[in-house]
Amino acid sequence: MALLGISVRFLDGIPQRLRPEVAGLNAAAEELNPFQVKCVIKSLAMLRSEGPCILGDAQADKLTILWGDSHAAALMPALDKIGREAGMRVAVFARGHCAPISGLVPPYNELVMFKICSKSNKFVQDYIKANRPEFVLMAAVWSQYRLPLEFSRNIASTLNVLSESNTQAFLFLEVPSYSGGPKAWARQAVSGRISKQDISNLSTMPVNLHRQETKAVAEVLKSHFGTRVIDPADFLCRRDGVCRMFEGATWYYVDGQHLSLAGAVAVSPLLANAFSF
């Protein structure tokens, strides 16, 4: 609330002298995903007792699964929109720091996360076998999960499960990430530590250097398993390689590496087009 108050005072009376992207910083920083509380997995016990959160058209026969870590959770608004428009039921299995790959965890809290993620992923695989969804969309910050050797080996095992269920797999590549984001930059902007031009420059300079490795592995999976690859950079980046966190007053990110509500909606045509092949 203090940051909001400072920002209001900072902006009050001079909106015409501020770039729209600066005016939209605080809104992006304070944004909440409406599905976060009810849909992100809190515990395996809750998942077993209540089942997955359902988005889109809850009565539809056509089933799609959204599976992954917090990057998958960021796509929930997009999948809900597509599901409602296309008559598709979307079961969500999103859990922070858990890649939708058997036997793979981030390089921190390894033992704890390995146990948690392995049990969650086993539940999802059993759900897939029992319900045979038409599509499974897997999303994660892939480059944090020890690329490329472990990634390619473990995801091949997961893709075999999907193939046996006649399920089409989609791999949503991680978004370009940044050192900072709306919340950090809002604080620095209101204190005068960075300028409007600094924000414009920082928000076009992605820093995840391993993203190309992920993309290369994804292309191999595409050729061997028929996996369909969806790259958010097709929307977020220009052909010259320059990417963007915002357009005008609309911020596509809520922090340095997660899409905002507006960002999820903005990339939804990429998902809709992929599902309509």
Image: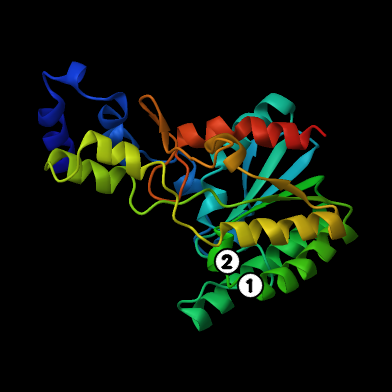
Q: Residue at 49% across / 42% down in the picture?
A: 35
| Residue 105 located left or right of residue 227 | left
Residue 44: numbered disc: 2
- Between circles 2 and 1, the one closer to the viewer is 1
Residue 163 in sight here: yes
Q: Along the line of sight, which residue is nearer the eye, 237 or 49?
A: 237
**Location of mark 1 (residue):** 119
Residue 164: quadrant of the picture: bottom right
**Percent of width and height locating residue 42:** 49, 60
| Residue 143 located left or right of residue 193 | right
Residue 57 in sight here: no
Q: Please tell me whether residue 104 is drawn above or below residue 20 in the rendered image.
A: below
Q: Along the line of sight, which residue is nearer the eye, 48 or 210?
A: 210
**Amino acid type indicated by mark 1:** Lys
**Percent of width and height locating residue 186:** 23, 41
| Residue 125 located left or right of residue 207 | right
For marks 2 and 1, the one nearer the N-term is 2
Q: Residue at 80% across / 37% down in the picture?
A: 62
**Quarter in which the C terminus is drawn:** top right
Q: Secondary structure at mark 1?
A: helix
**Amino acid type indicated by mark 2:** Leu
| Residue 51 located left or right of residue 111 | right
How many marks are shown on the rendered structure? Answer: 2
Q: Please tell me whether residue 1 is drawn above or below residue 156 in the rendered image.
A: above
Q: Residue at 86% across / 60% down in the picture?
A: 224
Q: Along the line of sight, which residue is nearer the eye, 47 or 150?
A: 150
Contact? badges 2 and 1 (CB < 8 Å): yes
